[in-house]
Image: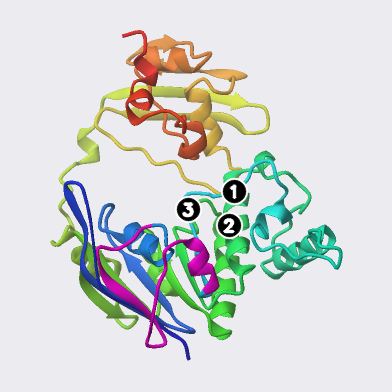
């Protein structure tokens, strides 16, 4: 049995102590979940394990031997893989080439064996019940397909331990069920999985142990017996938040936005709903159900065929994102990295993109 330990890990950034004397462990064939609010230190801890970030203090041991992880290559050589929350793919390469990127097989002539890469990629995708063209260029695919490729990249390295950071964020229910079957198979093959998610129902379903991080410190570690979402939330937040929401929806009677009979090609048809002042309205549905396209049409990214948008009792026309912005409508895309930011520009430049004329 393999055993991984992170002992007394501390890490500070200017103005904040991200991790304070954190110890975390996992053994082979186990799913040990790591949860906490945003900023609790989860990503920093996993960055240290993957060699992206260097700790100020502490050590990492595998099977009681201290190991040095200065970069992701060290982690790879120690059979550690990570499925990142942010996609790390080459959009100009194929699905198969991305899966085996940095881990390519070579033929007897010293060239990359593209036929083997394709065949192995097909076998891997079949093993997780995913039908995806391995020759397709990754830049042509959607976010859920990118997530699947990231998972396959981790599996291609034959790891002993895998970190899965929000792996279901872009998956629909059937794909999540497939992922959980994959995780069970990995467990049976002796692979340890560190699972990070904000979806507490998933955490409870898939975990053998659950560790809660709060403000850079370990708050508590639970076994899987008698765990409830309420108990996990209370441990993360530090108080019982049940029934704390005093907002009574019956008191919210003033519609601020009305969508009437919106339609767009085959994406959605005759969609109507109201958004009230002071209200958070959730749209849910499987991938391809049209919820994302509804939001994009509301922001003028895609053109509506029929329907009307009424804002504060006034009929408005939104033909492009500038129209939406001028009407006080903002949009945060699902693919924030590629659609919401200009990566080569500074934080300052990105922050003022929508108000340059001011």
- Residue that appears at 39% across and 41% down: 282
Secondary-structure class at tag 2: helix
What label does residue 89 carry, if any?
Answer: 1
Which residues, given as a range, are shown in magenta?
53-77
Viewer-nearest of labels 1 and 2? Answer: 1
- Give the class, few, some or many, for how many residues have Cα within 10 Å of label 3's Cα (few <14, many ≥20): some
Q: Are marks 1 and 2 in contact (CB under 8 Å)?
A: yes
- Furthest-top residue in this view: 357
Residue located beneath label 2 in the image: 150
**Considering only order in the chain, which callout, 2 or 1, is on the residue closer to the N terminus?**
1
Relative depth, front residue between 149 and 322: 149
Magenta stretch: includes residue 260: no
Residue 81 appears in the figure: no
- Image point 50% across, 32% down: which residue? 339
Distance between mark 3 and mark 2 Cα atoms: 12 Å
Q: Earlier in the sequence, mark 3 or mark 2?
A: 2
Which residue was labeled with disc 3? 169
């Amino acid at each position: 049995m393999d055993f991984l330990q992170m002992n007394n890990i501390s890490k500070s950034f200017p103005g904040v102590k991200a991790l304070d004397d954190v110890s975390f462990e996992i053994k082979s064939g186990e799913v040990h979940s790591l949860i906490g609010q945003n900023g609790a230190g989860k990503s920093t801890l996993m960055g240290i394990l993957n060699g992206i970030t260097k700790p100020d203090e502490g050590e990492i041991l595998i099977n009681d031997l201290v190991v040095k992880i200065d970069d992701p290559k060290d982690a790879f050589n120690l059979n550690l893989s990570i499925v990142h929350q942010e996609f790390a793919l080459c959009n100009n390469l194929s699905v198969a080439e991305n899966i085996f990127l940095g881990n390519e097989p070579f033929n007897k002539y010293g060239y990359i064996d593209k036929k083997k890469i394709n065949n192995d990629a097909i076998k891997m995708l079949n093993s997780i019940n995913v039908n995806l063209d391995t020759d397709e260029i990754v830049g042509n695919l959607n976010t859920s397909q990118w997530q699947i490729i990231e998972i396959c990249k981790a599996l291609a390295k034959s790891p002993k331990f895998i970190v899965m950071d929000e792996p279901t964020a872009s998956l629909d229910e059937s794909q999540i069920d497939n992922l959980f079957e994959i995780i069970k198979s990995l467990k049976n093959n002796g692979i340890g999985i560190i699972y990070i998610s904000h979806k507490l129902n998933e955490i409870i379903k898939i975990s053998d142990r659950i560790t809660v991080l709060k403000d850079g410190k370990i708050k508590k570690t639970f076994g899987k017996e008698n765990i409830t979402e309420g108990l996990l939330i209370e441990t993360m937040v530090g108080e019982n938040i049940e029934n704390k929401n005093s907002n009574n929806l019956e008191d919210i009677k003033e519609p601020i936005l009305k969508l009437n009979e919106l339609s767009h090609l085959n994406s959605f048809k005759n969609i109507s709903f109201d958004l009230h002042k002071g209200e958070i309205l959730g749209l849910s549905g499987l991938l391809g159900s049209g919820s994302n396209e509804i939001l994009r049409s509301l922001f003028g990214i895609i053109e509506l065929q029929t329907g009307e948008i009424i804002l504060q009792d006034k009929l408005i026309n939104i033909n492009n994102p500038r129209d939406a912005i001028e009407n006080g409508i903002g949009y945060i895309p699902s693919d924030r990295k590629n659609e919401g930011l200009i990566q080569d520009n500074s934080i300052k430049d990105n922050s003022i993109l929508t108000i340059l004329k001011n």
